């Protein structure tokens, strides 16, 4: 019979409590390695490692493509594809699975969406509604043609793509409307950067292109909001109700909130100590607008864009907000969005010849619709062929705005993985070709002028 004072250490409840509360003692190299790997794979540790990798690769590709005469954003877009399954996932599958496991995608998506909310606010803030109201007749014609013509071609080509590429539960109407808007988008921020780098911002050509692109942005996002409302509502009656709520929301923002924030900003402009309070009010409007747009059913990004549109246009006010928002959005969060898009893009799905033919068809339709529509309409309103072709090349730029639209379609289940990959490639090609196409147009017409200036001497 055991001594009553002896305790069975294997089964004692006290011992179990002690075991749970006693800290783990690292007593071997193997244990150190295991503990280190455990910390790396923790959600926070993995997210920070992903952000470091994304920023490094994005800046590396941005610098490389900048040296090649392309926009930095083109390199960052390519970096996103590089980090995804199309390149790194194919070349280094184990490392890719370790760095970007499927369980971590929700965290990256959350960060990318926050970055897009801030970015769309900045884009909206860069647009001046008062100037657009008084825009020239030429800009009206060109901007409308650059939306209507590619939209029609996009809807037309979707008839041939629907059976193979549309998800099973998506109607032809939703698929066609979305393909149309995806082909019609112009990347206003990328276009503005190109004009700035080529010293065209203050020229007549730069002014008309910026005006057209700004009008395109507003039109495209309004159409996109309507398409999203139709897709989410499921029925015509529900869609009409959603659109009605959206119109009421836009009216309140333009007619009530805009004058109010304008008066508030005037009061606080000269009071430096109250700048933080003003910024807090602006952030509240931004987040509230995005939230209302989301619950109405027209997507939070439209609400963020609209919040930017209603902001006062005074330089001091815009600089204040840009200092607070732009750096963190553009330099940190947007590369995460590019990477997240790249992780969704599976170019490896395009394994058969007819899929690449479909990709080529969409690229041709996109270029024909945007470049052709803008160039012809510009020529019809009186521009020279050189300026008309330059306008078409610039309006054909899609870039970041296209990726935003495509991700919305993917999240809504309208786009299947193969058509998503094809459309991402289309966005990359049409953005990449802008610079070389402008150089080619300039070279052609410079040589043409030189030939006219040659004096033919008689024998």
Image: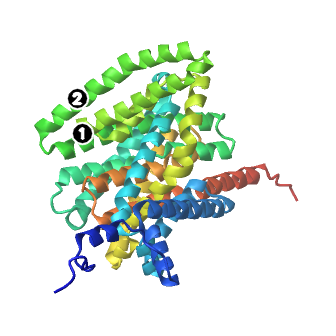
Q: How many marks?
A: 2
- Disc 1 marks which residue? 297
Determine the residue positioned at 33% across, 79% down: 352
Q: Is residue 92 depicted above or below 39 in this figure? A: below
- Residue 321, by quadrant, is top right
Q: Position of residue 145 (x, y in %)?
A: 41, 40
Residues packed near mark 1 inside 10 Å, few (<14), some (14 to 19) or many (20 plus): many
Tag 1–tag 2 contact (CB < 8 Å): yes
Q: Is residue 207 left or right of residue 137?
A: right
Q: Horizontally, is 204 left or right of 449 in the view?
A: left
Instruction: Tell me the quarter of the image containing the C terminus.
Output: bottom right
Secondary structure under the numbered disc 2 in the rendered image: helix
Judging depth in this view, the residue of 63 and 45 nearest the camera is 45
Of 305 and 224, nearer the camera is 305
Task: Give the quarter of the figure containing the N terminus.
Answer: bottom left
| Extreme residue toward the right, this view | 459
Assign a secondary structure to mark 1: loop
Residue pictured at 68% horizontal, 55% vertical: 443
Note whether 85 is above or below 451 in the view shown. Answer: below
Image coordinates for residue 130, horizontal then vertical, percent: 48, 21
> Which x, y percent locates residue 357?
36, 71
Question: Which residue is more in the foreground, 449 or 260?
Answer: 260
Expressed as whole percent of the image width and height from the top left, the position of residue 106 reads 34, 58
Whether residue 63 is visible, yes or no, is: yes
| Label ID, residue 245 | 2
The CA span between labels 1 and 2 is 9 Å
């Amino acid at each position: 019979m055991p001594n009553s004072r002896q305790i069975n250490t294997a089964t004692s409840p006290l011992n179990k409590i002690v075991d749970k509360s006693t800290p783990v003692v690292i007593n071997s190299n193997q244990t150190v390695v295991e503990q280190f790997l455990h910390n790396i794979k923790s959600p926070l540790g993995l997210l920070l490692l992903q952000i470091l990798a994304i920023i490094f690769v994005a800046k590396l590709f941005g610098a490389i493509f900048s040296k090649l005469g392309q926009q930095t954003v083109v390199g960052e877009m390519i970096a996103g594809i590089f980090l995804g399954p199309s390149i790194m996932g194919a070349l280094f599958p184990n490392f890719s699975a370790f760095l970007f496991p499927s369980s971590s995608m929700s965290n990256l998506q959350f960060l990318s969406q926050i970055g897009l909310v801030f970015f769309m606010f900045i884009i909206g803030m860069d647009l001046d509604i008062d100037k657009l109201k008084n825009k020239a007749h030429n800009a009206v014609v060109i901007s409308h043609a650059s939306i209507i013509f590619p939209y029609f071609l996009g809807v037309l080509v979707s008839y041939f793509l629907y059976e193979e590429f549309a998800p099973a539960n998506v109607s032809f109407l939703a698929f066609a409307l979305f393909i149309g808007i995806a082909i019609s988008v112009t990347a206003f921020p990328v276009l503005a950067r190109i004009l700035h780098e080529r010293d065209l911002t203050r020229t007549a050509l730069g002014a008309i292109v910026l005006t057209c692109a700004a009008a395109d942005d507003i039109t495209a996002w309004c159409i996109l909001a309507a398409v999203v409302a139709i897709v989410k509502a499921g029925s015509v009656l529900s869609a009409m109700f959603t659109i009605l709520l959206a119109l009421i929301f836009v009216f309140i923002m333009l007619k009530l909130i805009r004058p109010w924030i304008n008066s508030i900003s005037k009061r606080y402009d000269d009071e430096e100590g109250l700048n933080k309070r003003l910024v807090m009010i602006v952030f509240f409007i931004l987040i509230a607008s995005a939230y209302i747009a989301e619950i109405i059913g027209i997507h939070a990004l439209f609400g963020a864009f609209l919040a930017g549109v209603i902001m006062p246009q005074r330089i001091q006010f815009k600089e204040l907000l840009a200092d607070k928002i732009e750096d963190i959005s553009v330099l940190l969060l947007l590369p995460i969005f590019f990477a997240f898009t790249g992780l969704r893009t599976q170019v490896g799905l395009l394994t058969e010849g007819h899929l690449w033919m479909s990709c080529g068809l969409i690229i041709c339709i996109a270029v024909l619709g945007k470049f052709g529509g803008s160039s012809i309409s510009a020529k019809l309103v009186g521009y020279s062929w050189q300026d008309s072709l330059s306008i078409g090349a610039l309006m054909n730029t899609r870039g970041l705005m296209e990726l935003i639209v495509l991700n919305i379609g993917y999240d809504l289940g309208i786009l299947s993985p193969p058509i998503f990959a094809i459309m991402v490639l289309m966005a990359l090609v049409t953005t990449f070709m802008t610079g070389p196409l402008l150089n080619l147009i300039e070279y052609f017409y410079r040589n043409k002028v030189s030939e006219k200036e040659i004096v033919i001497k008689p024998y």
